[in-house]
Image: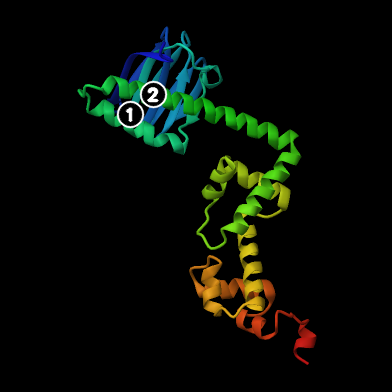
Amino acid sequence: MDSIRINSIILQEVDRSYAIPDHVHIQWQLYCVLSGGVKSVVGGTPHLLGPNDVMLVAPGVVRDRYCHGRAPTYLYANFINNGLTLNPLANRKLTMPPELLPDLTALAQELRTPGQSDTDLLVNALLVRILIGLVRHVSSGQTRTRLSVQNLPKQDELVRQVEAYLRNNLSLRITREDIAGVVHLCPTHLARVFRARTGKTLIERLTELRLQRAADLLRESTMPVTAIGYEIGFNSFSHFTRLFRKRMGLSPSDYRSAGGIILPPELGSA
């Protein structure tokens, strides 16, 4: 048995007169705004929906919809659920996670150009993928919340994993999203946990590790100073020099000349 059976799925571009008064459906409905804005009251709770906002409305729940701001383009699907765990998503406003946006785009494109022999199969597969992705996204968010409050040892292990990744990839152009992908957390939550446990942002810690590595290379190697800056991930030598001086009190060249020994100002001027 298929996990869902689609009754209808439609992509609509409407003008600012768009207005659908109170109504119900006997099936589940996924409603997603692609552009523009929609105001919707679902089960008595108002929601403002913008681009890539989505709601999964349970059967029998009263909802209405009206244009809010720019004329909207939206898609909706009415379907019978045969096995997916959808109740955690019911009647909530969600923003489509970034990893599901390609599937949403593909679904909209398929609805814009129907008529292929396998359109129904592809549409069904994309919708199932989006629904499962939303379920996992909400579930993982709930798990992260429990960890952040109750499980400090796991947070310390998370920090250890992040530190190891940073140390092993100093030469790469690392983003917060890259780090989050390694530890399977959303970037915002990772940044919050890391700062709470270390007192530093991810970028501050990455910069600190790079400068520590630069100091090691200046003491222990004969690599040119400019090469060291690029080796540890700085694309601008002047930026590297400025940050190094700020941290060490000396330029990289002077630090190397001093053998990595930083004297107090009153001794250094004697």
Residue 44 visible? yes
In the picture, which quadrant includes the C terminus? bottom right
Disc 2 marks which residue? Answer: 127
- Disc 2 + disc 1, Cβ < 8 Å: yes
Compared with 234, 38 (above or below) is above
Seen at 29% across and 25% down, the residue is 12
Q: Secondary structure at mark 1?
A: helix
In the picture, which quadrant includes the N terminus? top left
Residue 119: x percent and y percent?
26, 23
Marker disc for residue 69:
none
Give the quarter of the image for residue 8.
top left
Identify residue type, mark 2: Leu
Residue 155: x percent and y percent?
70, 42
Disc 1 marks which residue? Answer: 107
Seen at 44% across and 22% down, the residue is 40
Compared with 257, 188 (above or below) is above
